[in-house]
Image (tube, helix red, strand yellow):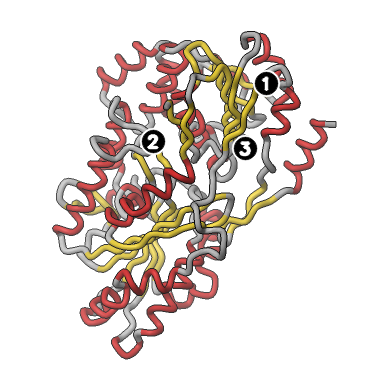
């Protein structure tokens, strides 16, 4: 009966994030509680920001107060385009609401001249098919497509589309010292501290060389979710913002905080100020402090982060701090596209121990994704945590390489995990573990 219900939600349940609809499960905590009745399981999930139970914040007044009219007039006066930098499908952002508000403000400014508008899709290192790009453009732009004179998808691996700006190599459009409005979503990030439009405007449009140099700091002990001060990854992003401004770029950022498919709060302004303004909101919505280490963590990751293991791994990173050494961590993620970017798996295959992985990286230099392998080996080899990946999309033969056990479904996961747990075990089921961050109190 229980497995029948699980199959039913996989077949039909959906949630809408902005203009995009994804098949996602309802809360999984009840299923896990029924499957593991002998474990004292508590559930933690993101919480809406206090005071935002009403309609989603309207973007137009926020953008107006933050200076969009002045930015638009300056762009129109010089004949330069206003470049909108938006997220790709790998991250939830209600970009349509942002565009609705932006064009409403622009249309109020017709007496001062309306600038040409173009769109730059920030992809970072992500890859997507032509069909995925077309679908994303259609869903995101909607009626505003006719107002956009050009669309570019950033490709970090195409040198012809990149230019140097100070210490960083970025997409050529953002290197033009023009006028830019970025829209991003804010949630914890396990090594950048917090995501947001500051990342969309920088890391999202970096060339592979600069992106790799920034992500190499992800192996530092100074990085963790929700930490900005002293975080070398964040400091590198802030440095890229400074380089853009020194080149003459004028930047405006709008951040959305999205909980359960709904924008619950927004911040707008200079990219770093909008980030600072949103940090308390993100902490309220996406952090949970734990008093004592848990015997079991069940990290549930939903779309779009569950599309592959490379993305779903965030669920491990966001929760691993509170599982005890020698405990059990279950990653519950569909991973319908398998592993995804697989360079980190190649490194794991070459080095079965934490010391070995570190030695490989030291000898050949950091490559993009190496931090995932280093931290995974630190968890399983260094701390002795038993890792199970609950997914029908990952080949079971990869288990020994990953240092994990691949489990077809939740029932199989329970059969594997139960004997590893002590009597009177205590644990947590973490909903939306791709975003929610656990912290030891």
Which residue bears the numbered disc 3?
A: 336
> Can you give x and y, in whole percent of width and height, for residue 395 in the image?
61, 24
Q: Do the residues labelled 1 and 3 touch (CB within 8 Å)?
A: no
User: Is 171 rendered above or below residue 330?
Assistant: below
| Quadrant the C terminus occupies | top left
Q: Nearer the viewer, mark 2 or mark 1?
A: 2
Residue 296 vertical placement versus 266 (above, below):
above
| Chain-order first, disc 1 or disc 3 | 3
At numbered mark 1, what does the secondary structure look like: helix, strand or loop?
helix
Q: In this view, does 292 lie to the left or right of 16?
A: left
Residue toward you, 282 or 112: 282
Marks 2,1: beta carbons within 8 A: no
Q: Earlier in the sequence, mark 2 or mark 1?
A: 2
Q: Distance between the residues labelled 2 and 1?
A: 27 Å
Residue under the point 41% across and 65% down: 151
Instruction: Quote the CA–CA distance across marks 1 and 3.
Output: 18 Å
Secondary element type, mark 3: loop
Residue 310: x and y, percent? 48, 34
Q: Is 356 positioned to the left or the right of 332 in the image?
A: left
Q: Name the residue under label 1.
A: 413
Can you say which quadrant of the picture contains the N terminus? top right
Q: Name the residue under label 2.
A: 225
Q: Distance between the residues labelled 2 and 3?
A: 26 Å
Q: Examine the image and state in which quarter residue 262 appears.
A: bottom right
Q: Which residue is rendered at x = 56% and y = 16% of the image?
A: 295
């Amino acid at each position: 009966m229980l497995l029948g219900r699980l199959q039913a939600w996989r077949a039909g349940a959906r949630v809408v994030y902005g203009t995009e609809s994804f098949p996602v499960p309802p809360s999984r905590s009840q299923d896990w509680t029924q499957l593991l009745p002998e474990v004292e399981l508590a559930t933690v999930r993101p919480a809406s920001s206090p005071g935002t139970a009403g309609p989603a914040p309207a973007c137009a007044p926020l953008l107006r107060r933050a200076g969009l009219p002045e930015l638009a007039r300056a762009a129109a006066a010089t004949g330069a385009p206003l470049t909108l930098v938006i997220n790709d499908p790998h991250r939830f952002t209600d970009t349509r609401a942002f565009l609705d508000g932006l064009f409403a403000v622009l249309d109020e400014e017709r007496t001062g001249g309306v600038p040409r508008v173009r769109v730059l899709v920030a992809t970072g290192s992500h890859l997507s098919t032509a069909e995925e790009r077309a679908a994303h453009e259609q869903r995101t732009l909607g009626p505003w497509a006719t107002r956009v004179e050009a669309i570019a998808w950033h490709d970090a691996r195409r040198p012809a589309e990149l230019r140097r700006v100070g210490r960083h190599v970025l997409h050529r459009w953002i290197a033009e010292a023009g006028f830019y409005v970025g829209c991003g979503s804010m949630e914890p990030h396990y090594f950048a501290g917090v995501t947001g439009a500051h990342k969309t405007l920088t890391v999202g449009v970096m060339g592979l060389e600069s992106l790799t140099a920034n992500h190499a700091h992800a192996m530092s002990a100074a990085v963790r979710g929700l930490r900005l001060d002293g975080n070398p990854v964040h400091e590198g992003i802030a440095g890229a913002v400074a380089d853009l401004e020194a080149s003459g770029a004028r930047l405006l950022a709008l951040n959305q905080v999205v909980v359960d498919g709904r924008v619950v709060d927004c911040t707008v302004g200079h990219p770093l100020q909008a980030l600072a303004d949103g940090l308390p909101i993100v902490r309220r919505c996406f952090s949970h402090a734990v008093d004592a280490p848990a015997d079991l963590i069940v990290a549930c990751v939903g779309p779009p982060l569950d599309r592959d293991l490379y993305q779903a791994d965030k669920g491990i990173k966001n929760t691993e701090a509170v599982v005890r050494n020698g405990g059990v961590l279950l990653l519950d993620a569909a991973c319908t596209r398998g592993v995804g970017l697989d360079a980190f798996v190649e490194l794991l295959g070459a080095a079965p121990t934490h010391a070995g992985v570190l030695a490989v990286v030291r000898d050949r230099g950091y490559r993009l994704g190496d931090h995932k392998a280093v931290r995974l080996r630190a968890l399983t080899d260094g701390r002795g945590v038993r890792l199970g990946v609950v997914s029908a999309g990952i080949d079971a033969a990869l288990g020994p390489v990953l240092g994990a056990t691949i489990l077809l479904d939740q029932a199989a996961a329970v059969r594997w995990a139960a004997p590893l747990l002590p009597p009177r075990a205590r644990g947590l089921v973490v909903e939306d573990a791709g975003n929610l961050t656990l912290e030891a109190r």
